[in-house]
Structures are given as C-alpha cells and as structure tokens.
Amino acid sequence: MDVLCTHPMFGPESGKNGWKDLPLVYEKVRVRNETRCSSFLHIFESENILEKGCRMVEMSCEEHDKVAARSQFLSHSIGRILAEMGIESTSMNTKSFETLVKLKESATNDSFDLFSGLFIHNRFAQQELMNLEQSFEKVKQRLLKKMSEQQSLSSV
C-alpha cells in the first residue's frame, strides 16, 4: 500500500477558473509504486493542457501544518475579522483597502465550518491566533504611545 498525502491549497472559489499555478502540497510518506504515484500527481500538474496545472509543492505534513496555520488560517482569520467590522467597498478605496475587501469576501465565501476546521484540526493555528492578538496589541500600544507623546508636545 502507498501513502501519499495531498492538500490542494485552494477551494471551489479559488479554483473555479482553473488550477493554473495554485499550490498543491504533497508528501510521499510511503510510496512503493513510483509510477502510480507520479501518474496521480500528474493529474494535478496538467489539469488543463493549454494552460498549466497546479504548482506542485513537496513538503512534510508537519511543515505543511506550520505553513498553513500562517498562510491559510491567518488570512481566513483576518478576513473574518474584517467581516465582523462590516467593511464594504467605498467610493474612495485605496488599492490596499480593495485588497482588504477582497480578503473579507474570499474568507466569507467559505463556510464557517471550513474556517473553524482550519483552527480545530491544525495544532499550530492556536499559536497563530495568539500571535495575531499579541501583534495587534503591540501596534495598538505603539499608536497610543505616539498619540500621548504628541499630546504632551502640544500642551507645552
């Protein structure tokens, strides 16, 4: 028996227009039949002959979980936070703000079950959530300190 772990790092929304350059992470845990394994992986590499299939990324399951906690869970978390804030497109969007609106829309197009699964089933996600909270607090404290310094200068 062969064991090949795979995870397409995209869902229906991201992959609706094809898999071109979307990452598929895999690890050959125990492969005895290399031909069968290569044939299976080739399906994802060549999803669309005219274009190009997935970008194949070989890494251990452990490394995948570490990276996914940051790249996938963190982006979904920030998108969900933006949704809670109720951000919407405005008549004077900056490019950065448009990116935030798209992130919010992308995150909320996926179910909350998918989002909670990213948290519950990845042991590294909880640390990323704590890192997000701590980093937000650091930025907030820097802003408050700067404001306090400015107010002190103004009163002199």
Image (cartoon, rainbow, N blue to C red):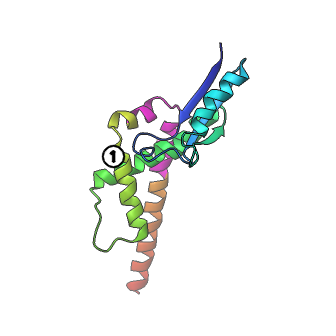
- Compared with 143, 133 (above or below) is above
Specify the quadrant that holds the C terminus: bottom left
Residue name at image x 29 percent, y 64 percent: 89
Which corner quadrant of the image does residue 37 belong to? Answer: top right
- Pointer 1: residues within 10 angstroms few (<14), some, or many (20+)? some
Residue 90 vertical placement versus 37 (above, below): below
Residue toward you, 65 or 102: 102
Q: Describe residue 102's horizontal placement relative to residue 124 as left or right.
A: left
Decide whether residue 123 is among the magenta residues: yes
Residue segment shown in magenta? 116-134
- Residue at the far front in the pictured view: 50
Residue 36 x %, y %: 67, 22
Residue at the limit of the structure toward the top, as seen here: 1
- Residue at left 54%, top 33%? 7
Q: Amino acid at mark 1?
A: Thr
Q: Nearer the viewer, residue 90 or 155?
A: 90
Q: Is residue 104 above or below residue 139?
A: above
Residue 120 among those drawn in magenta = yes
- x and y percent of residue 138 in the render? 48, 58
Residue at which label 1 appears? 108
For this view, does 99 lie left or right of residue 23? Answer: left
Kindly indicate the quadrant of the structure image that contains residue 101: bottom left
Quarter of the N terminus within the rendering: top right
